[in-house]
Image: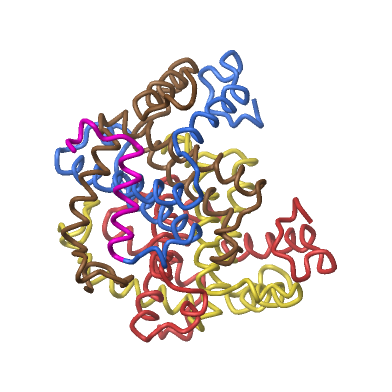
Chain colours: A brown, B blue, C red, D yellow
Amino acid sequence: MVDSEMTMDSLRDQVLKFAEERDWEQFHSPKNLAISVSVEAAELLENFLWLTPEQSSTLTNDQLAKVSDELGDVLICLVNFAARLKINPLHAAAQKIRKNQEKYPIEKAKGSAKKYTEL
Amino acid sequence: MVDSEMTMDSLRDQVLKFAEERDWEQFHSPKNLAISVSVEAAELLENFLWLTPEQSSTLTNDQLAKVSDELGDVLICLVNFAARLKINPLHAAAQKIRKNQEKYPIEKAKGSAKKYTEL
Amino acid sequence: MVDSEMTMDSLRDQVLKFAEERDWEQFHSPKNLAISVSVEAAELLENFLWLTPEQSSTLTNDQLAKVSDELGDVLICLVNFAARLKINPLHAAAQKIRKNQEKYPIEKAKGSAKKYTEL
Amino acid sequence: MVDSEMTMDSLRDQVLKFAEERDWEQFHSPKNLAISVSVEAAELLENFLWLTPEQSSTLTNDQLAKVSDELGDVLICLVNFAARLKINPLHAAAQKIRKNQEKYPIEKAKGSAKKYTEL
């Protein structure tokens, strides 16, 4: 399969096969995988720790390659986590967007960084 | 669009449109979005804080609905982050799996939770 | 005891007594407490998500009160975690500063945000 | 100073001196330091990722030394963060314990892992 044909479903299959081949399912409780998502997200964040907002938009190729790897790790862990709980990540995101549309109506939220509880 | 047709590309388009309509792009530096991924990942994790590994595999419907919402938030932030840096998240994950296959060869990694640096 | 007499030792005693009175020690494995530190640290961070670096230095009294509460939560969880493993947090920090002094010698590290591995 | 005389105040002084000597204050906005607390907390957590709750209580000396170092990092970042905002971390924690005593009265919270909003 070439990358251009990659879908969320085929990613999930690859992630599950990777774990199964290594007999790692014994470690992959939803709790442990939720931890792994958080740990990988922090590794992604670490790359931006001392950057200004502007610098974070103009990464060097080396920085971008490292960030892309960490982003990949977060998604791999998230997809693994979702699969164990039989959640479709794309559906979960689509449903959350619909909820956010109600929590943040355009006319109220426009240009504001306030949380919906303070709008 | 019905959810069953949802793809990573259409999710990205929805996420970017949501931000654009609310004039939120001014807040969405890659640095801030990396923070948002980490914050949302911790909110996901909070749901599992006091659960045993076994309890985390047998969530109630209420718990599962909450977890699904938080999972959606993590993916939304991750997709937004990736789009700002023009990274394709599925490609980044596929590339990372290939690297992991080299770091964790089946014969060495089988049944072990050790980090590749300790294998 | 008035707050001005508060020490790390008396904080630890208060934290352990709080858990014991509520029969919560059953939940307080080092693993769970390590999760709690991370979850609380993310709640602290959430307060700064959309702020500019400058805004983060000039918080309103309301923001400061909220941040102080979250900071308290992080320290409480950290002290609880350390106590379960019989680690003295102040000693651990002092020892780490000594290591950092070797990793980041003044002449090399001055004015640089680089990681010690890149100095 | 020997470690046995270490207090939160002397730790703060050491942390601030360390940053000042390296001209690092320019990077230490409260926002960046809040990120650093979260990143270090995740590094601490990573040590427990694949451990069972039981294993997390019986660390080897090597594991304990690594955990102690990471714990030190979290406290160093937290103390630095607090100092920039002129918050006394011990007072913040003591105040939060008092609030928690109201949120989690012993008779209601005893033996329960529920959040105060669900008690």
Residue drawn at x 60%, y 66% is D76
- Where D75 falls versus D45 (above or below)? below
Q: Position of residue D42 (x, y in %)?
A: 50, 51
In the image, is residue B17 part of the stretch drawn in magenta? yes
Instruction: Judge left or right: residue C44 versus residue D42.
Output: left
Q: Position of residue A93 (x, y in %)?
A: 27, 44
Q: Position of residue A80 (x, y in %)?
A: 38, 31
Q: Position of residue B30 (x, y in %)?
A: 49, 57
Q: Quadrant of the N terminus of chain D?
A: bottom right
In this orientation, which residue lies closer to the viewer: C30 or D81? D81
- Where A48 falls versus B75 (above or below)? below
| Residue C9 visible in the picture | yes
> Magenta stretch?
B1-22
Q: Quadrant of the C terminus of chain D?
A: bottom left
In this orientation, which residue lies closer to the viewer: A102 or C34? A102
Residue drawn at x 26%, y 35% is B6
Residue drawn at x 56%, y 72% is D79
- Where C50 falls versus D72 (above or below)? below
Q: How many marks?
A: 0
- Where D81 falls versus A48 (above or below)? below
